[in-house]
Image (tube, rainbow, N blue to C red):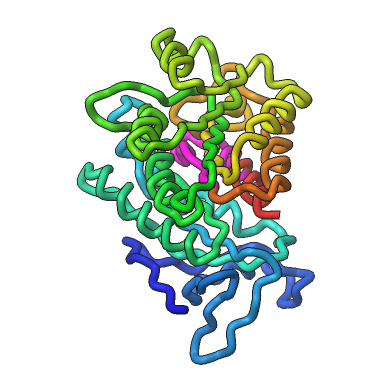
Amino acid sequence: MSFQLPTVDVPPQPWTGRFDGDEAAHRRWWQAVDINRTPGPAGVEAAPDGEPATPAARKPAALLGFASDEGVRRNKGRVGAAAAPAALRKALAPLAFHLDRTVADVGDVVVSGGDLEAGQERLGLALAALLDSGHQTVVLGGGHETAYASYLGVSASSAVQSGQRLGVLNLDAHFDLRDEPVASSGTPFLQMACAEGDAGREFRYAVVGISEPNNTRVLFDTAEKLAVRYLLDEDCEADRARDFVASFLADIDVLYLTIDLDVLPAAVAPGVSAPAAYGVPLPVISAVCRQVARSGKLLHLDVAELNPEFDIDGRTAKTAARLVDTLLR
């Protein structure tokens, strides 16, 4: 079975980090992530130079960057998220590698010249190819316009096209359901709702961490009209968040999880376009990630809204890296 990944804009670059030894017990992410192999099909990694391919212990993971802040610019936010994929890799690199799956970095899709829509389409094509070849996919955004790019790939995948019920779980302080003439980081989930309706599918969307003061009545009304499930940030106690997510997972077959880092308190995640005055505690968000990972329904995940320019001591990037590591366990 052949596999062809649509061309990305920037090929993967070498990872670096602390060196403790070459043995498996010493490995860190920078030593484990492969930038030289083309991810192969159906849980098998394609080896270079004619070497035999070896089955992965679990579904192999593929990391794909989305270097974009055009959606944030259009949404009048603090630009800088285009630099996030590199910062996320830098934060992942020194972490001890405890995963029992292979991980490949396949490079970045870059939005340039303000052409957000073309970049979203390119990422969607690459993502669909990776999903249909049997990968656990991770997109490193990017502003939250990353979400619609991810959706294009997820919705085009064979899992969704075959009729499995897709659920979109957003960890976010905002609904991002704006009805605007031009797409931005504030519109992706309304775009998804329209696309799902055009495809004759039910839009299944849930949000953990909604900040009531940061969402207008129009957005709450839109959420109600679309039957969006949500949990306010002030209601995100551990047990309540767990029950909320469990109820949502029970009604779907496959899950797309998107994490907007502004769901976290500003002290934990200062490096975002819109730092949270309240936010959901990191232990609650981490527990949701573990719950999702253990559900067996996670098809794809992305992390969005990291802005390295405002990231004090790399706090936001380090937190995001920890969540990615948790989700791939």
Residue 312 drawn in magenta: yes
Residue 245, x across and y down, in percent: 67, 31
Left or right position of 88 against 231: left
Name the residue rendered at 41%, 31% in the picture.
189
Residue 118 drawn in magenta: no
Of the pair 94 and 155, the residue shown nearer to us: 155
Residue 104 against residue 176 in the figure, above or below: below
Name the residue rendered at 45%, 38% in the picture.
307
Residue 107, x across and y down, in percent: 42, 62
Residue 283 against residue 12 in the figure, above or below: above
Residue 291, x across and y down, in percent: 72, 40
Q: Is residue 18 visible?
A: no
Residue 17, x across and y down, in percent: 61, 63
Q: Determine the image quadrant of residue 257.
A: top right
Q: Which residues are magenta?
A: 301-318
Name the residue rendered at 52%, 34% in the picture.
260
Left or right position of 239 against 138: right
Q: Determine the image quadrant of residue 242.
A: top right
- List the single residue furthest toward the bottom: 50
Name the residue rendered at 58%, 51% in the picture.
91
